[in-house]
Amino acid sequence: MKFIQEAVNAIHLDGVYIFKNIVGDDVLKSIAHDVETNRISMAQNKVGGVYLKNGQYFHSQLLSVSRAFVEFALSEYVHDICKAYFGMSIYRMKCHRYYENYGWYKGQAWHIDNKNGEDQILACNRGLIFIVYFDETDDGAFEYLQGSHGTSSNLQGSWAVDRWLDADYIQTRKRRALGNSGDMIVYDTSLIHRAGSIEKHDTLRRALFMQVDTDMNNGEPMYVMPGNLPRSLPHLSEEAILNFVGFGLPCLPRPWPSSDYAQYLEFEEKLKLLRSTPVNR
Ligand SMILES: O=C(O)CCC(=O)C(=O)O
């Protein structure tokens, strides 16, 4: 518990803390396997993921396909962090995703995950995000402005927030979270951050993203495989589990992101090209 308190103190101070090698290899392998066997779903009565032509793949329904993900999401250390940071035990998983960023992914604009401004419906200033790396990650790694969570809520929106920041502020605070398989980045919803752009055409960056908020009034729809959920755990009551996954609570109409067959085909074409380049042959 002492190391959790140290991490939580660091998140209060810097907006972020990186746990080294905390998620087991077996957990990551199981999640990757579960995604692989449910990668896309066409003409099947099950959930799958989507490809986006910008160079990303997302699976946003791991509660349905991956018991290993459920075990991670309900794990004692994740909930010790949440309880210690929020100072209470009522909070909710707002969304989660397994995602892959490919060689032509251009990265994100600097943003905040409190979803104020453009997307008021999901607004919540008290939240934590968990990102877990599946592999050694350098190209396209998570980038952030250290300590920016303290003032970012004064900005006028959540996206491309560097519009309102001066270059020196960005320069002195900018950090890149290089990491290894099993490292977990935990950051405050209000920390300014972005996924870096991928520079090498054969890079594949794999990660897990889970957002936990104290706002109980909205979350993405999540499809649950009942058999994946325990009724209670030594560290979580039945009520806490049901609250965490949003039973009986309001949800947005759609999960994110959406895609279509054309984007899928375009993605497949690009992957074919990628696989036929000399470095991959
Ligand atoms: O993958 C990353 O490094 C950051 C992802 C992120 O910021 C987001 O999806 O909002």
Image (spheres, grey):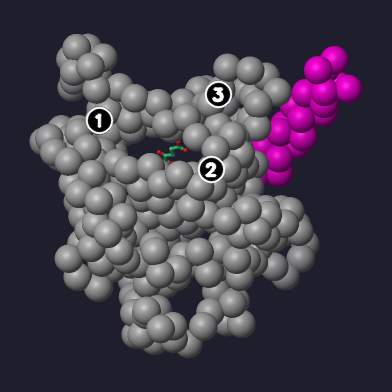
Side (left or right) of 242 relative to 63: left
User: Observer-nearest residue: 168 or 276?
Assistant: 168
What residue is at 28 percent from the left and 50 percent from the top? 7
Quick check: 211 above or below 229? Answer: above
> Label 3 is placed on what type of residue?
Asp
Which residues lie in the magenta part?
Answer: 260-281
- Label 2 crowding class (10 Å Cα cut-off): few <14, some 14-19, many 20+? many
The x, y position of residue 199, in whole percent, is 58, 17
For the C terminus, the quadrant is: top right
Is residue 139 in view from this perspective? yes
- Kindly state the secondary structure of the residue where label 2 is placed: strand
Q: Which residue is mark 3?
A: 139
Q: Give the mark nearest the N terminus, 1 or 3.
A: 3
Q: Which mark is on residue 133?
A: 2
What residue is at 64 percent from the left and 66 percent from the top? 65
Q: Give the mark nearest the N terminus, 2 or 1.
A: 2
Q: Which residue is mark 1?
A: 146
Q: Give the mark nearest the N terminus, 3 or 2.
A: 2
What residue is at 40 percent from the left and 51 percent from the top? 130
Quick check: 261 above or below 159? Answer: below
